[in-house]
Amino acid sequence: MNKEIKGFTIKLIIFALIAFGIHCLVFHILFPEMLLFIPIWTIYLFNSVLVLTIFCYLNYKVGKGSAKAYSIFLVLTLVKMALSLVFLLPLFVEKSDNVVPEVINFFISYFIFLIFEMISLNNFLKND
């Protein structure tokens, strides 16, 4: 594992843990009685794995000399959106009682991770 991936992984873990802690705290303050169909930790794990996978793949492609890193990122972001819909599918199939809060929980973390990913990849590509 090269130093860019190690550094990114450490930053991602720290970022995910801080965001997860804040998200759980706010959720439990605002909705103390609500039980979620999809726990918050699985949402953060899902987003973290996807962000790390995309970074590793882009790091690999840039290392091989590909000049289309931004195009690859856009395609992978579309794939990530499709996987997110598959991840949320049980909410709609099982008819959860709290669909709106569940979807909001997911997309808050999704967009937070997307912003983190874009900033990190932009810094990585500038340095490369």
Image (tube, helix red, strand yellow):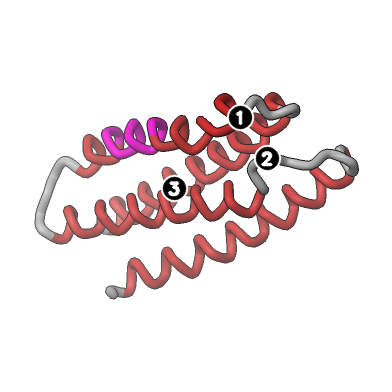
- For the stretch drawn in magenta, the main secondary structure is helix
* Depth order, front residue of 8/105: 105
Structural distance between the alpha carbons of marks 1 and 2: 9 Å
- Residue 37 is tagged as 2
Decide if residue 55 is on the left or right side of residue 86: left
Point 27% across, 34% down: residue:
75
What amino acid does circle 3 point to?
Answer: Glu
Q: Secondary structure at mark 1?
A: loop
Residue that label 1 marks:
94
Residue that label 3 marks:
117
Determine which quarter of the picture holds residue 104. top right
Q: Nearest to the eye among marks 1 and 2: give it.
A: 1
Residue 73 at x, y = what percent?
Answer: 29, 40
* Depth order, front residue of 99/2: 99
Point 58% across, 65% down: residue:
14
Q: Nearest to the eye among marks 3 and 1: give it.
A: 1
Q: Earlier in the sequence, mark 3 or mark 1?
A: 1
Determine which quarter of the picture holds residue 102. top right
Q: Height in image: 57 above or below 78?
A: below
**Residue most extreme to the left:** 65
What amino acid does circle 2 point to?
Answer: Phe
- Residue 40 is tagged as none
Determine which quarter of the picture holds residue 105. top right
What amino acid does circle 1 point to?
Answer: Glu
Quarter of the image with the N terminus in it: bottom left
Q: Which residues are magenta?
A: 74-82
Residue 82 at x, y = what percent?
Answer: 38, 31
